[in-house]
Image: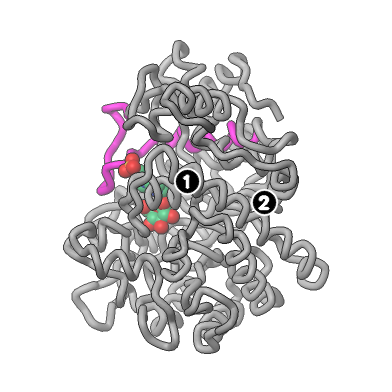
């Protein structure tokens, strides 16, 4: 697939995105554009550290997030922790009952790596931890809900971090061992696996900006080393499934990316937006989904040149051997996409020197007309959803896509009309991408089923369609207005516009 993006295609994309937000209202509200395709999978998503609690019981080992919240309460809103969270380790049956009541066909959850491997290694497999996910999966299946399992959603064993974590290339072998155990245990029941949630967020927030666990501030180097090892680890797990489990279990293993839409503020900034796309999306997409594999050429060029100018003897962007280029290329049965928001790209620079932000040589801005949410990074830009979906499809040969997270935050209310607005408008854009642009989207998971531990923001930013009372030791769950809206949408098989 082309690494460069022609001006013509880009203009078409822009027109597509803009027409749907302005003059295309009629098309958008037509009945046939509001219906989900047959067999479209509608689900809800969560992640282990954000909901489970039970951080130090039943044989679980310490994770990087346990360490961060306990050692640096100052870095988390209100000193909140995931020690108890929504208590889903004990209350998972209630969660499944809610999914069932609302009509969801699938549930995306993640497994806590140190709950399975408390020492970080397969010398000790924690039977209680293994059993917990069997119980959860069995409960889901008994209620007709298909499990989608994420192996890693940001909480790796602290002991592995003590040995370098995602900066150590051995991580590929450690993650491979863990993946083998997961596939062996759950492969007969789970048919859709996702390896690593949001490589870019893991590597930028954890190893460059240092805000997420493990809190390492290594801008310009850490994020590149981390992505390098994340890609190797993903591919190692994928090849293990391929060679040891696929023929028996006939399931699928996908890779998950967090993507914003990077739209040129106007035609003048087309090239800038293309560079932004390659640095933020191509960084992990190109090695896996392009025909030639490896990082996008514009990244190799720009990071190489800047590194030289800065006095480094080698590029800060690590180099893959042919062995790894081949192992990583085509290592996904589907593409999982987390999408929340968009940016406008203009010329200029941003970020410190050196850093991944700065290396791009562009600047990201937001439109002052975009509606806000409770999260400062999250502006409501429905047309950006269609824009990025079309861009992914056109650049990488229209792979099967599952939307694995999409949603919006508020500060906590049961009458969450803003959330309903967000879902309705974003879903409309997704359906236009399916019907008008031919993007191969197979399912959609909202974020999130429950209000949960929102990382550095603690419990102050709420993404749930179900309210969780964090003052209550029983962590009572109360359906929000958006949950009722979803129930109607799923039952009707189409978006309700009133
Ligand atoms: C997802 O990440 C996570 O998978 C999920 O666990 C989380 O609860 C959910 O979003 C809601 O946040 O401040 O400009 O540096 C979303 C992707 C990437 C969003 C990093 C916040 C920081 C942007 N995240 N980003 S900025």
In the picture, measured across the screen, residue 72 lies left or right of residue 226, that is left
Which residue carries the number 1 mark? 200
- Pointer 2: what residue? 334
Above or below 12: residue 64: below
Q: In this view, does 371 lie above or below 96?
A: above
| Residue at 63% over, 22% down | 4
Q: Locate residue 488, reporting x and y percent.
A: 46, 60
The crowding category of the residue bearing disc 1, from other C-alpha atoms within 10 Å (few below 14, some 14 to 19, many at least 20), is many
Specify whether residue 378 is in view. no
Percent x, y for residue 315?
53, 32
Judging depth in this view, the residue of 153 and 219 nearest the camera is 219
Q: Give the range drawn in magenta.
A: 366-393
SS category of the residue bearing label 2: strand
Residue at 38%, 86% (x, y): give it. Answer: 57
Residue 249 image point, x, y percent: 76, 71
| Residue 265: percent from left, percent from top | 40, 19
The part of the image, by quadrant, that contains residue 452 is bottom left
- Can I make out residue 481 in this image? yes
User: Which quarter of the figure has residue 170?
Assistant: bottom right
Q: How crowded is mark 2: few (under 14 residues within 10 Å), some or many (20 or more)?
A: many
Q: Taking 459 as reference, is 261 left or right? A: right
């Amino acid at each position: 697939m082309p690494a460069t993006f022609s001006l013509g295609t880009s203009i078409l994309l822009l027109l597509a995105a803009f027409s749907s937000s302005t003059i295309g209202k009629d098309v958008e509200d037509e009945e046939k554009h509001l219906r989900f395709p047959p067999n479209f999978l509608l689900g809800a998503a969560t992640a282990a550290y954000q909901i489970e609690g039970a951080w130090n019981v039943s044989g679980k080992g310490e994770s990087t997030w346990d360490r961060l919240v306990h050692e640096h309460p100052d870095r988390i809103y209100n000193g909140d922790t995931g020690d108890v969270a929504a208590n889903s380790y004990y209350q998972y049956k209630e969660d499944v009952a809610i999914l069932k009541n609302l009509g969801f066909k699938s549930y995306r959850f993640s497994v806590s790596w140190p709950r399975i491997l408390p020492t970080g290694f397969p010398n000790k497999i924690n039977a209680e931890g293994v059993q917990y996910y069997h119980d959860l999966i069995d409960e889901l299946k008994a209620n007709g809900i298909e499990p989608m399992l994420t192996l890693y959603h940001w909480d790796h064993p602290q002991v592995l971090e003590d040995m370098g974590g995602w900066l150590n290339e051995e991580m590929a072998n450690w993650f491979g061992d863990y993946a083998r155990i997961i596939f062996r245990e759950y492969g007969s029941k789970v048919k859709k696996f996702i390896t690593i949630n949001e490589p870019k967020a893991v590597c930028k927030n954890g190893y460059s900006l240092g805000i997420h666990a493990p809190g390492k501030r290594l801008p310009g180097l850490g994020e590149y080393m981390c992505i390098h090892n994340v890609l190797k680890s993903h591919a190692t797990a994928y090849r293990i499934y391929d060679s040891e489990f696929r023929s028996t279990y006939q399931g699928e293993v996908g890779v998950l990316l967090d993507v914003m839409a990077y739209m040129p503020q106007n035609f003048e900034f087309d090239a800038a937006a293309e560079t932004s796309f390659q640095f933020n999306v191509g960084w992990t997409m190109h090695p896996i989904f392009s025909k030639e594999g490896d990082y996008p050429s514009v990244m190799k060029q720009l990071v190489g040149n800047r590194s030289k100018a800065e006095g480094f003897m080698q590029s800060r962007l690590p180099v893959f051997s042919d062995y790894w280029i081949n192992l990583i290329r085509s290592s996904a049965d589907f593409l999982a996409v987390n999408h929340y928001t968009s940016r406008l790209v203009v010329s200029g620079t941003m970020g410190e020197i050196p850093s991944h932000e700065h290396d791009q040589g562009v600047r990201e801005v937001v439109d002052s007309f975009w509606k806000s949410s409770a999260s400062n990074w999250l502006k409501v830009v429905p047309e950006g959803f269609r824009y990025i979906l079309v861009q992914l499809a056109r650049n990488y040969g229209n792979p099967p896509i599952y939307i694995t997270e999409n949603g919006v935050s508020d500060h906590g209310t049961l009458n969450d009309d803003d959330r309903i607005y967000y879902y309705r408008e974003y879903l409309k854009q997704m359906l236009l991408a399916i019907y008008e642009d031919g993007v191969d989207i197979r399912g959609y998971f909202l974020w999130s089923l429950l209000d949960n531990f929102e990382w550095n923001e603690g419990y102050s930013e709420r993404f749930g369609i179900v309210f969780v009372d964090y003052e209550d030791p029983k962590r009572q769950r109360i359906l929000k207005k958006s949950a009722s809206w979803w129930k109607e949408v799923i039952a009707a098989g189409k978006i309700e516009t009133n």
